[in-house]
Image (tube, rainbow, N blue to C red):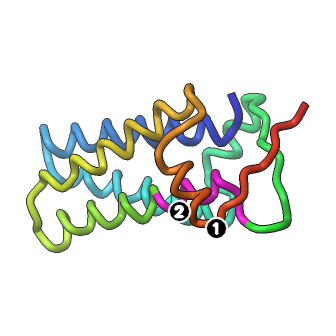
Amino acid sequence: MTINAALRLMAGSVILISLWLGYSFTPYWYYLTGFVGLNLLQSGFTRWCPAVSIFSKLGLKPEPSSTKGMSVNQGVHIIAGLLILGTVSSVVLLEMPQQILIATAIIGASLAQSAFSGWCLAFTFARLLGFKHLPTRS
């Protein structure tokens, strides 16, 4: 498993768990969901998040990077981060119905499963938006 795959697995899992906790116990857990979205968004631009250091120390390998443009993984982080922040802020700040968070749960599940399958719908959107698919190392 690569660092990006582990990052998507962790992000998706935390999203799903925090949504469940927010629905079951207190909506304050949605702030954790929003934090994950914010972290995904910033990692899309910086190629770094706090979990990357941990995953590196655990021996996970980074995917090849390119100085020419942004990668599909960065695109996925940006797309997911924006969608998560949009849905969570709609519920928390604008007091819209919690049913909107179903979209966030789908994003979380998609991120988590993509760690194993290597594909989610956001990969397709990222490619269509011009993010670059980087070849894997041999």
Q: Pick the quarter of the image with the N terminus.
A: top right
Residue drawn at x 69%, y 39% is: 3
Range of residues picked out in magenta: 70-79
Specify the amino acid type for callout 2: Ile
Q: Position of residue 108 (x, y in %)?
A: 38, 42
Q: Main secondary structure of the magenta part?
A: helix
Image vertical order of residue 131 relative to residue 8, above or below: below
For the residues bearing labels 1 and 2, Cβ distance under 8 angstroms: yes
Q: Which circle marks residue 45 in the picture?
A: 1
Q: Pick the quarter of the image with the C terminus.
A: top right
Outermost residue, front direction? 128
Q: Which residue is mark 2?
A: 78
Asked which quadrant contains residue 70, the reply is bottom right
73 in magenta: yes
Residue drawn at x 49%, y 51% is: 122
Which of 114 and 16 lies nearest the eye of the viewer?
114
As measured in the structure, the alpha-carbon distance from the residue carrying label 1 to the one carrying label 2 is 8 Å
Outermost residue, right direction? 138
Q: Secondary structure at mark 1?
A: helix
Locate residue 58 relative to residue 43 in the image: left or right: right
Q: Position of residue 68 (x, y in %)?
A: 83, 67
Specify the amino acid type for callout 1: Phe
Q: Position of residue 31 (x, y in %)?
A: 30, 57
Q: Secondary structure at mark 2?
A: helix
Q: Earlier in the sequence, mark 1 or mark 2?
A: 1
Locate residue 25 relative to residue 71 in the image: left or right: left
Residue drawn at x 41%, y 35% is: 13
Which of 75 and 20 lies nearest the eye of the viewer?
75
Which of 26 and 19 lies nearest the eye of the viewer?
19
